[in-house]
Amino acid sequence: MRTVFFIPPLRSLSGGLAAIYELAEILIEQDLPVAVTCPVASTPGFSALDARAERLDWARVSAGEDISPHDIWCIPEGWPNAIAPGVKRGAGVLVYVQNWIHLLNTLPQGVRWKQLPVRYLAVSAPVDWFMREVMELKSEAILPPAIADFFFDAGTNDGSTGVAKGHPGDCSETAGKPACGSRGADSGKPCLDGARASSTVRIAWMPRKNKALASQMFEVALNALAADGLDKSVELVEIAGKSRAEVAGILAGADIFLSTGFPEGFALPPLEAMACGAVPVGFSGQGGFEYMRNPQLPGLYTPPFPLEPKEWGANGLFVSDGDVMNGGLALARAVKMRLDGNPQWDELRREGRKAARAYGLKERSTRVAKIWPELIELFQNQSR
């Protein structure tokens, strides 16, 4: 069976869209037939994928042409109206659920997902749990996204120290936006000359992810650190408007990544931080507990769903989503761990790298090679 991907017309390349492109590329590399269609041809990344896959005209597809019962019609959960062309032509409709929250707010009032003639693919175990326990939906498989290889290449730490090797010592705009001092005021000058001093703890963060809450968490942390005279040991590095390769470079030079995104289906940035040797602190978005694990410390979050056994242990400090107080205190705790040379710090970093390695491109390709033949067989039996 051919897999036909509906590419949503977005103005920027989101993580979810990148994961769909990546999946299509993997199927192509595995010599499976792939076609793509998009209402807006200028959607970021579409033209590059279009060069490797069969392109279908959206006007014809939306009119019920060019797809058949021999196709798998794959769409993201945030675009339920795109289900219609697949159903109309009797194709096997596969909804790739990448964020549990979209299952709550995308259908017309009175319509339930379980009423639709579709099958589901979940991006993580927490999403799978939510679908099953809350929405009464069954996912056919769990398929997480992958970390690009350059995140592992950027994270050259061996986990033995808290200082990232190969740090460029550059706090200019090309390396992220620095903010130094007790309240993170931008000095407009490089914060470091040469290699990063061991007495400075560098915290990377993404202002597009709940900026106001992040600022409040910084304030809590800095006030808590000020009691011990440690507030001026913190350097904040803003990640905004960067390529993924640039993000990898910034994370490789950071000690901590402040995770402030929620809700999330998987939460890829904290995992990318782990690959680079930074310790994530903050929110999980719920979906992050696909790979996130907490140590036994006060104020940290226990999710409502069972955590699957993994080959790694505690790899960050994670609090309840939106919990500014505990989030700030966890951030202060992480800073102190790093400055004190606490052995638990190195353990968090090592376990983080271990978790990240389970979600590389090779691992995702292996998962796809197992899942897709099973989906094809499932849909073929359905169409008979």
Image (spheres, helix red, strand yellow):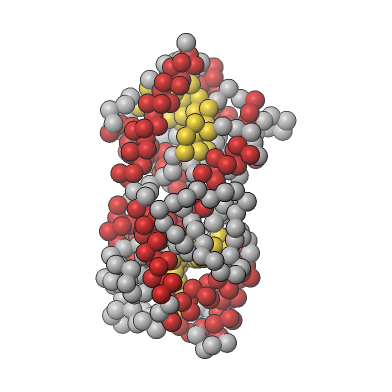
**Residue drawn at x 60%, y 37% as measured from the top left:** 132
Question: Which quadrant of the figure contains the N terminus?
Answer: top left
Res 361 visible: yes
Q: Does residue 276 appear to the left or right of 136 in the view shown?
A: left
User: Quick check: 315 above or below 380?
Assistant: below
Q: Does residue 223 appear to the left or right of 197 in the view shown?
A: right
**Residue 171 vs residue 295, the one in the foreground:** 295
**Residue drawn at x 54%, y 36% as measured from the top left:** 77
User: Quick check: 63 above or below 100?
Assistant: above
Pinpoint residue 361: horizontal percent, then vertical percent. Answer: 32, 45
Res 24 visible: no
**Residue drawn at x 43%, y 30% as measured from the top left:** 5
Q: Does residue 1 appear to the left or right of 89 in the view shown?
A: left
User: Quick check: 320 above or below 164?
Assistant: above
**Residue drawn at x 36%, y 57% as measured from the top left:** 354
Q: Quadrant of residue 377?
A: top left
Q: How many marks?
A: 0
Pinpoint residue 15: horizontal percent, then vertical percent. Answer: 45, 47
**Residue 332 vs residue 21, the one in the foreground:** 332
Residue that sits furthest to the right in the current view: 110
Residue that sits furthest to the top in the current view: 384
Pinpoint residue 172: horizontal percent, then vertical percent. Answer: 36, 73
Q: Quadrant of residue 131?
A: top right
